[in-house]
Amino acid sequence: MSGGERRLLGRWGEALAAEELRRRGYRLVAAGWQCRFGEIDLIAENEKYISFTEVKLRRDDRIAQAREFVDRRKQERIRTTAQLYLAEHPTHLQPRFDVVEIYAPEGLQTRRPKLIVLENAFE
């Protein structure tokens, strides 16, 4: 898979995850928010939480579940990036770190990808 195909697949997965969050009552605040520390795939909020969401798309879970690719180092980068976001965008909402797993066996051709939303996946 080329870099361009991988980016397209990543954007498609993030769009699916954003739609699922909207369906659950969240308002999308930012997608692909970047700073010098890293990137947060999706930032969404509802009446109680601001969710910093990492999206992981895989064809299957034979080797490992998608959530397992959000390792300790990745979690720390997301936390640090979220702290900078909150410093620039103060809010009264409680921050939470979520992961959306997407399984798409046929990639972009997958008719019904499986989405699993893991709320409060790490602290």
Image (spheres, helix red, strand yellow):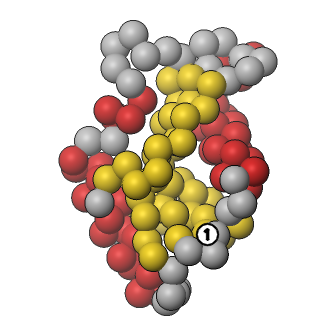
Percent position (x, y) of residue 93?
Answer: 51, 80
Of 96 and 72, nearer the camera is 96
Q: Amino acid at mark 1?
A: Glu
**Label 1's element?**
strand
Q: According to the image, label 1 marks what residue?
A: 45
Percent position (x, y) of residue 25?
Answer: 72, 60
Q: At x 50% / y 54%, what residue is drawn?
A: 53
Q: At x 62% / y 60%, what residue is drawn?
A: 31
Is residue 66 visible in the rendered structure shown here? yes
Q: At x 43% / y 64%, what residue is drawn?
A: 96
Q: At x 48% / y 62%, what residue is drawn?
A: 52
From what the image shows, is residue 86 above or below residue 78? below
Question: Image check: 54 left or right of 121?
Answer: right
Residue farthest front in this picture: 48
The total number of labels drawn is 1
Question: Image check: 37 left or right of 61?
Answer: left
Percent position (x, y) of residue 11?
Answer: 65, 42
Q: Quadrant of the N terminus?
A: top right
The image quarter in which residue 36 lies: bottom left
Circle 1 residues within 10 Å: few <14, some 14–19, many ≥20: many
Of 37 and 13, nearer the camera is 13
From what the image shows, is residue 36 above or below residue 116? below
Percent position (x, y) of residue 39?
Answer: 45, 59
The image quarter in which residue 106 lies: top right
From what the image shows, is residue 48 above or below residue 28? below
